[in-house]
């Protein structure tokens, strides 16, 4: 059996958080470049500024966006591993705390009622899955709230079917309009229960922009949703244009015979997501 | 690109149309949700505001901490729609304009026309470029709110787009 000290996981979270705050994912950068080529006027100006901004962030060692987000951490832990050291959540929070301090990231986490800031961007939203084997895969997704605020979940009736799903995705992006920093990345969760559906949508956002679900019918749904969303004409920053979304990713799971849950988790154009396998 | 210096003159404002890209320099004050709530409490209790409202420009933003040797950290705009409930009253009391991101409601559009003021969109997600435009900053109110406090910032060439102008036009209006 492999033994891992949770400190190693905390250190990994620290590394990934620092990197994520300062850089866009490669697939995001490529999609933004492509969008810049397709747009004109104010939308093009916005996209060009966003691309220049990443260069500026790297040179000046500043985060790309001041909203360095809530720290969403996904851990897949091989069940043949014995974890020793501090409790796992504590180790993860320690990595977040150090990264947000050393990286000059904004501390954006507060009590929902009193609005008092926790001061160090903890706690992280930690999701742990036990999987086979003896590896640990760590994913860090700093999630900004301009886009998180415009996300939505709906329990559709099974009769509404695929068309209902497509309509809800399009409606959610339309209602969000200019607010979530378009062009957005649309994460869709399909099926499961109320809670697991939302998590599927979040998980979809950790996929590369432009990747397709291995299931052919889900991949077709992703493509159709992208087409409909881009027909809305919202464009970069809501300035109008052809590219309202950089991509749509959908994750699917079996659900109850009485239900069709759909979750739409919006991600702004600053897609920051880092992964590492320990 | 057109360069502007705050405070804007009536001529400056009349020359700005939704969709124009500009570089803005001068003094702005940051304020987000919590700071607006407190500013309104002060107004309701007839107490003085921490900065003169007359012709002041509010930037809907909360900066990251400044790296060593820099005036300010990453500092792009936040979603303006959350401040819609506050903007019309502040404009009627003399506010010189706002900077943020995303559409604002019809009440705000009317208040901009009524008071001949402008709402600018900074580029959301361009936090490093916006933060780099800050030449100096100081906290003028509510330091306990940390990044949500009110900061007075001296901007140099902040890249903006005129989002809603004094003629009632909006870049967000889609046909």
Image (cartoon, rainbow, N blue to C red):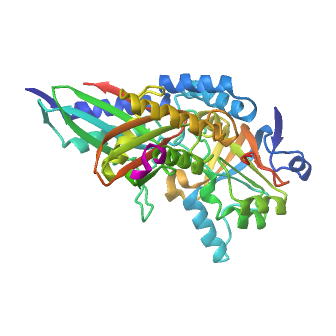
Q: Residue furthest left?
A: A1
Q: Quadrant of residue A254?
A: top left
Q: Is residue A58 left or right of residue A126?
A: right
- Residue at point 34%, 32% (across, down): A139
Which image quadrant for residue A78?
top left
At 18% from the left edge and 41% from the top edge, which residue is drawn?
A86
Side of B22 where B105 appears, left or right:
left
The part of the chain drawn in magenta is: A159-164
Residue A35 location (% of width, % of height): 62, 27
Q: Nearer the viewer, residue A99 or A78?
A: A78
Confirm whether residue B4 shows in the render: yes
Q: Decide if residue B49 is on the left or right side of residue A121.
A: right
Q: Is residue A127 above or below residue B37?
A: above
- Asked whether the viewer can see residue B127, the reply is no
Q: In front here: B84 or A6?
A: B84
**Residue A4, image x and y in percent?**
16, 29
Of A43 and B64, the residue lying toward us: A43
Q: Quadrant of the N terminus of chain A?
A: top left
Residue B52: image x %, image y %?
Answer: 74, 62
In the image, residue A142 lies in the stretch drawn in magenta: no
Q: Is residue A223 above or below residue B100?
A: above
């Amino acid at each position: 059996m492999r033994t891992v000290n949770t400190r190693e996981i905390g250190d990994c979270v620290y590394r990934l958080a620092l990197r994520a705050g300062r850089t866009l994912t490669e697939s995001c950068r490529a999609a933004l470049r492509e969008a810049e080529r397709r747009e004109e006027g104010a939308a093009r100006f916005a996209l060009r500024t966003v691309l220049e901004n990443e260069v500026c962030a790297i040179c000046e060692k500043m985060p790309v966006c001041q909203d360095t987000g809530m720290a969403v951490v996904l851990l897949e832990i091989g069940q043949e591993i014995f974890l020793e050291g501090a409790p796992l959540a504590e180790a993860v929070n320690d990595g977040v705390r150090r990264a947000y301090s050393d990286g000059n990231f904004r501390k954006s986490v507060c009590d929902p009622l009193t609005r008092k800031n926790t001061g160090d961007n903890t706690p992280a939203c930690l999701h742990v899955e036990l999987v086979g084997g003896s590896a640990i895969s760590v994913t860090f997704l700093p999630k900004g709230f301009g886009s998180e605020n415009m996300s939505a979940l709906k329990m559709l009736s099974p009769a509404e079917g695929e068309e209902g799903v497509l309509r809800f995705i399009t409606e959610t992006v339309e209602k969000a309009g200019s607010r979530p920093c378009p062009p957005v990345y649309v994460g869709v969760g399909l099926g499961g229960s109320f809670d697991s559906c939302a998590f599927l949508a979040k998980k979809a956002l950790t996929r590369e922009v432009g990747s397709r679900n291995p299931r052919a019918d889900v991949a077709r749904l992703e493509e159709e949703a992208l087409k409909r969303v881009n027909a809305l004409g919202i464009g970069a920053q809501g300035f109008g244009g052809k590219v309202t979304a950089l991509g749509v990713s959908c994750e699917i799971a079996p659900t109850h015979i009485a239900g069709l849950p759909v979750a739409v988790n919006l991600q702004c154009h600053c897609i920051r997501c880092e992964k590492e396998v320990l | 690109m057109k360069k502007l210096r705050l405070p804007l003159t009536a001529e400056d404002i009349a020359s700005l149309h939704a969709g124009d890209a500009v570089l803005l320099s001068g003094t702005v004050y940051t304020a987000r949700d919590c700071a607006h709530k407190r500013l309104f409490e002060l107004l309701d209790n007839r107490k003085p505001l921490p900065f003169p409202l007359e012709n002041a420009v509010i930037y809907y933003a909360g900066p990251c901490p400044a790296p060593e040797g820099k005036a300010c950290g990453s500092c792009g705009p936040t979603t303006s729609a959350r401040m819609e409930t506050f903007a019309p009253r502040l404009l009627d009391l003399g506010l010189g304009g706002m900077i943020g991101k995303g559409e604002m409601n019809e009440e705000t559009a009317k208040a901009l026309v009524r008071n001949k003021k402008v709402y600018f969109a900074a580029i959301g997600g361009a936090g490093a470029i916006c933060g780099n435009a800050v030449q100096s900053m100081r906290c003028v109110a509510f330091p306990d709110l940390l990044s949500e406090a009110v900061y007075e910032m001296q901007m140099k060439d902040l890249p903006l787009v005129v989002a809603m102008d004094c003629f009632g036009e909006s870049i967000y209006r889609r046909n």
